[in-house]
């Protein structure tokens, strides 16, 4: 399966399962990042699987031990957890650090993220 085989409708489904509103620019960024040909594991399919797993967890026995805020935090962590991937960089933790930096840029550009997550 190619990294970008989710297609337009499926990427809308991907973001519809996220409980925090993701602006269009960041949707495009994330789809592009996770669809890159250099990826074999951290792909859109992987992100969808993780979001689906969280949705199933939230529905387990009709209730979730997580608050809505905790679920939104997990949604964002799933979306950004490995959005940067450079297979040629051998520095330990490089991709994770750069992914965290991208999340920081997202949070800075979406004032409500910072306000919401700090309350």
Image (spheres, rainbow, N blue to C red):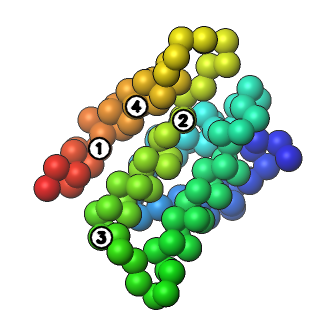
67 relative position to 3: left or right: left
Q: Residue 46: x, y in percent?
A: 66, 49
Displayed quadrant of residue 9: bottom right
Mark sitting on residue 67? 3
Which mark, by number, is residue 110? Answer: 1
In front: mark 1 or mark 3?
3
The residue lying at 54 percent from left, 35 percent from top is 82
Secondary structure of residue under mark 2? loop
Report the Cα–Cα distance between label 1 and label 3: 21 Å
Crowding at dot 3, Cα within 10 Å, few <14 / some 14-19 / many 20+, comes out as: few
Q: Residue at x 61, y 50 (%)?
A: 47
**Is 110 on the left-hand or right-hand side of 15?**
left
Residue 58 at x, y = what percent? 46, 74
How far apart marks 2 and 3 lie (CA) works out to: 24 Å
- Label 3 near label 4: C-beta < 8 Å? no
Nearer to the camera, 92 or 18: 92
Instruction: Pick out the residue farthest to the bottom.
Output: 62
The secondary element bearing badge 1 is classed as loop
For the point 65% across and 58% down, the residue is 49
Q: What is the number of the mark on residue 82? A: 2
- Asked if residue 45 can be seen in this view, the reply is yes
Quadrant of res 74:
bottom left
Q: In this view, does 53 lie above or below 107?
A: below
């Amino acid at each position: 399966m190619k990294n970008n085989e989710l297609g337009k409708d499926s990427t809308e489904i991907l973001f519809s399962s996220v409980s925090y509103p993701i602006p269009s620019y960041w949707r495009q960024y994330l789809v592009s990042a996770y669809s890159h040909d250099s990826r074999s594991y951290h792909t859109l399919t992987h992100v969808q699987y993780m979001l689906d797993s969280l949705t199933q967890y939230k529905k387990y026995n009709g209730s979730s031990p997580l608050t809505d805020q905790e679920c939104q935090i997990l949604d964002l962590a799933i979306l950004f957890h490995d959005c940067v991937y450079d297979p040629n960089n051998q520095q330990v933790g490089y991709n994770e650090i750069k992914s965290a930096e991208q999340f920081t840029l997202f949070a800075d550009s979406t004032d409500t993220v910072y306000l919401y997550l700090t309350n």
